[in-house]
């Protein structure tokens, strides 16, 4: 029996006044999610263990069956694996955002969601100007910084402090001096580059500095096959997810037109998923768009992204009749514009049936699976096919 897990990043939310007291999942038209709930069963999933930050790294490791308490070292090294950046035993890799800081306030954690065609040249320019670290261009605002023989540091995700002054959120301990020097130098260099001048002239937010966070050393993950006894593949536009897949020995399937943003090509993802499911036992299909809409605080875009994920799922289900689960990795509520650690709803067809009718936060809370730990989800699915 083949297994498909579809993760709509950040889909879960809170009831919103703008939606008549409904959550975006409740408000959106999701006939395919709801079909899975009707033909299967629902529950709630704890994707963030106690003591961990509510990050996509923690959540997706958990869903894939890798206990963060045992395997998590930081987000940076997971993204390094996807970017083919080799890490030495003592190296610390940090996720490194291009951000917009104005008058000491974090205005935008993504520098106006700067495209790779502009972000890449900025990172390359900084790489020649910032000492003591190496910088590597990724996708859009998502880049990588490596500190050779690093010690690590306490850092803050930039998406958690939008609208706040950065002075109280700068790196602390360990590599902090190196990181802060690199951040200050980036501010000096970036303001004079033509890419930023062009963005300002077009009314777009410039990348005013870099922001390193979530550093760690290369983790040692057992392969997905060792852990679960089946082959696995990943479809995602995000380096974080592809890095986890590479470290787990999963096949990484690149989809043209998959951007990791609101404009991702949902139809292409569905086509590549249908093709992959003909030959792999397990496929993890990740879509970033709902999370980006949550960070934007846009109710309209979040509902639209959820409906597009639902349409993608419907397209896949036309030819796939195996076990399928749909869920967010964590909530990204419109109200706070960042991740929260609350349990998320999930629906799975192919294990059991209950009387739930829709994949929503309130409906899933009464599902037959109750509330369970995410690290146990795949064990449950693979132990009880059919």
Image (cartoon, helix red, strand yellow):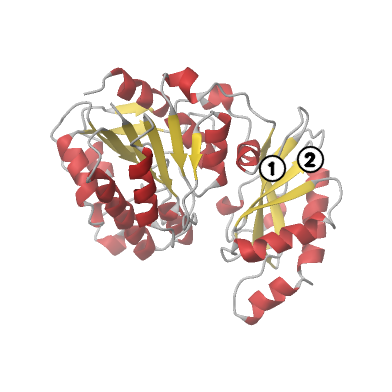
Q: Residue at x 18, y 43 (%)?
A: 35
**From mark 1 to mark 2, how far is it between C-alphas?**
8 Å
Q: Is residue 66 above or below residue 165?
A: above
Dot 1 and dot 2 residues touching (CB under 8 Å): yes
- Helix, strand, or loop for circle 2? strand
For this rendering, which residue is in front, 46 or 222?
222
Q: Earlier in the sequence, mark 1 or mark 2?
A: 1
For this rendering, which residue is in front, 365 or 354?
354
Tag 1 residue = 94
- Residue 339, image x, y percentages: 48, 46
Q: Is residue 104 above or below residue 94?
A: below
Mark 2 crowd level (few <14, some 14–19, many ≥20, 10 Å Cα): many
For this rendering, which residue is in front, 122 or 295?
122
Q: Quadrant of residue 214?
A: top right
Give the quarter of the figure containing the C terminus. top left
Tag 2 residue = 147
Give the quarter of the figure containing the N terminus. top left
- Helix, strand, or loop for circle 1? strand
Left or right of 202 in this view: 364:
left
Mark 1 crowd level (few <14, some 14–19, many ≥20, 10 Å Cα): many
Q: Residue at x 38, y 39 (%)?
A: 276
Q: Residue at x 27, y 61 (%)?
A: 19
């Amino acid at each position: 029996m083949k297994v498909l897990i579809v993760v709509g990043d950040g889909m879960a939310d809170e009831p919103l006044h703008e939606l008549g007291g409904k959550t975006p999942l409740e408000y959106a038209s999701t006939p395919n999610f709801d079909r899975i709930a009707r033909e299967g069963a629902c529950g709630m999933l704890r994707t963030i263990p106690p003591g961990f930050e509510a990050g996509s790294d923690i959540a997706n490791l958990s869903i894939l069956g890798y206990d963060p308490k045992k395997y998590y070292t930081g987000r940076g090294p997971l993204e390094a694996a996807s970017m083919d950046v080799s890490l030495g035993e003592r190296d610390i890799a940090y996720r490194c955002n291009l951000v917009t800081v104005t008058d000491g306030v974090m205005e935008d954690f993504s520098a106006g969601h700067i495209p790779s065609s502009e972000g890449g040249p900025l990172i390359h320019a900084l790489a020649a100007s910032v000492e003591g670290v190496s910088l590597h261009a990724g996708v859009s605002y998502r880049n990588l910084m490596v500190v050779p023989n690093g010690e690590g540091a306490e850092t803050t995700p930039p998406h958690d402090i939008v609208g706040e002054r950065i002075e109280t959120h700068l790196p602390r301990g360990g590599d902090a001096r190196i990181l802060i020097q690199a951040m200050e130098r980036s501010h000096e260099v970036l303001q004079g580059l033509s890419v930023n001048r062009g963005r300002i002239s077009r009314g777009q937010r410039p990348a005013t500095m870099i922001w390193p966070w979530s550093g760690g050393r290369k983790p040692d993950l057992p392969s997905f096959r060792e852990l679960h006894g089946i082959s696995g593949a990943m479809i995602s536009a995000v380096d974080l997810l592809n890095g986890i897949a590479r470290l787990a020995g999963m096949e990484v399937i690149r989809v043209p037109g998959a951007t990791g943003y609101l404009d991702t090509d949902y139809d292409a993802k569905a086509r590549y998923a249908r093709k992959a499911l003909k030959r792999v036992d397990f496929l993890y299909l990740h879509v970033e768009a709902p999370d980006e809409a949550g960070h934007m605080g846009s109710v309209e875009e979040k509902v639209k992204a959820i409906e597009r994920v639902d349409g993608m799922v419907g397209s896949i289900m036309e030819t796939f009749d195996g076990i399928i689960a749909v869920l967010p990795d964590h909530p990204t509520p419109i109200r706070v514009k960042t991740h929260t650690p609350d349990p998320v709803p999930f629906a799975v067809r192919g294990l059991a049936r209950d009387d739930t009718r829709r994949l929503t936060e309130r409906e899933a809370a009464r599902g037959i699976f109750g509330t369970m730990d995410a690290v146990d989800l795949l064990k449950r699915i693979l132990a009880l096919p059919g």
